[in-house]
Amino acid sequence: MDQLPQHLDIDWTSCRAHGLCAELLPEHVTLDEWGYPLVDARPVPARTLKRARRAAADCPVLALKLAAA
Amino acid sequence: MTSTFTDTLMPPRLLAPGGTPADRATHETRYGPLTHTDPAALLRTLAESGLTGRGGAAFPTYRKFVSVIDAARRTGRAPVVVANGAEGEPASAKDKTLLSLSPHLVLDGLQLAARATGAGEAYLAVEDGATRLETALAERDDLFPERDNPFPVRVVRVPKRFLSGESSALAQHLSGHAALPRHQDPPVREQGVRRAPTLVQNVETLAHLALIARYGADWFRSAGTPSEPGGALCTVHVQGREPQVVEAPFGMPLHRLLPLEGTGAILLGGYHGTWIPTAEAARLGLSAATLGAGVLAALPADRCGPAETARVLRYLALESAGQCGPCLNGLPRIAAAFRTLAAPGPQGTARDDVARWAGLVEGRGACHHPDGTVRLVRSALTTFAAELDAHARGLCSATDRTPLLPVPEHRS
């Protein structure tokens, strides 16, 4: 139902640099020199949404979010 | 001790003249009684006044009120209103001075804000002086009849930390948790204290509101500039004298607020603010965009800007809540590298490292601590570029390296 453009958001107080998000969404997430995600600000394209939701659900501490832009 | 000069730069509005705390009777004699305007009229006047927050972000006060009122309507929950007097910025004394001299102005503003938003609870959060404020509160029992004021204002003590006054940290503290920032989605104005829509306003903002409610928007706009109406409290640091809290209108040239002769740079806004070279400061006026927490500090030409910055950065790194990876990893590294830059001698890759880490912490935290720290770092790299070059060649142009800016001792 969500027609609004979605983008990736990190709850920085939760993130523990597991790095799974960078493996699951390499075109949107890279890791910095300490292992924390560098997320691009682009809206997640429709074809990637399902995988992005999966990545958010798979984050061990649920720090990766999909939020309306 | 901080001295106050209330009558040199503009007719004093907020600070009781003579540096004597104003009790309820003195307060009412000076300003007149607080008239009970209806909430809609007060909101209109607030919108027309153009008042912005005086806690550092300069967000339009009217818009914040409206977001809180809208969130309350959507959720059906009565808002919470918080007067933020947690002045964690070590170089700032304006909120403490205001609360000490004119407590009733802040309490007027808090009660007006509570009425205008239909709040169910109101708090005044401070680091110090809670007992004095409770005495001031007791002086006003009759002010709002019971039917208009179903809740008492509660004075709450917050920990003396740099981040205690950050709005989400304050909301966490008032909800019974540690006073630490949290992920701000949803924002505090929608879900703050115990998940109720929460209006957090700096105490000075509320004091301005108390006067706008009495005298109107046109009176408020008679000071300042058309785009930045009104005035602000500033803490002014000049070497060789006690810090002063002054009231000044926006647009006033900085050189009228502090003497620029014999200085090399000015710190504008506080420890999340910016260093600017004196030559540039000479052309600038007081602006809400750069005022930050209201701190203005002059760096004498015989002092070392990088050394002062390094001391402040060490403090800021230690004040990180340590919750967010980039801040936890980046700030101590930036502080350590800046310590290298502050001493004359080989710098290795320190300058490049600082610039890279600054980019890595910016915008990557629950609160703006990394962003504010980066602002200071980048302004120091630019403003003190020539001095940093001299340090790299083993020279320091400063002849006096005694610490200048106030930095609290850390327990560790």
Image (cartoon, coloured by chain):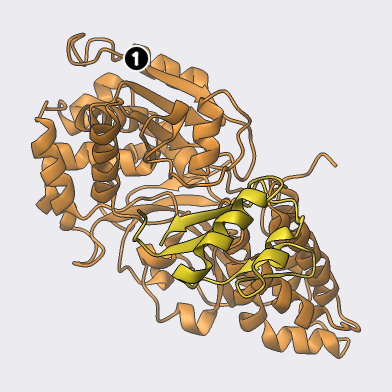
Residue at the spot of label 1? B152
**Residue B311 % position (x, y):** 75, 60
Residue under the image location 66 percent in, 46 percent down: A14
Question: Which hue is chain A drawn in?
Answer: yellow
**Looking at the rendering, which quadrant does residue B391 occupy?**
bottom right
The image quarter in which residue B337 lies:
bottom right
User: Is residue B211 visible from the viewing direction of this image?
Assistant: yes
In this view, the residue in front, B215 or A7, is A7
Q: How many labels does the image show?
A: 1
On-image quarter of the N terminus of chain B: top right
Instruction: Classify B327 as above or below B285.
Output: above
Report if residue B129 is visible in the image: no
Residue B188 rendering spot, x and y as whole percentages: 43, 40
Q: Where is residue B405 in the image (x, y as percent from the top left)?
A: 67, 58
Q: Which residue is drawn at 49% across and 70% down?
A: A47
Chain letter, orange = B
Q: What residue type is labelled 1?
A: Pro
Report the quarter where the C terminus of chain B lies: top right
Taking depth in this image into account, of B74 and B213 the one nearest to the observer is: B74
- Residue B64 left/right relative to B270: left
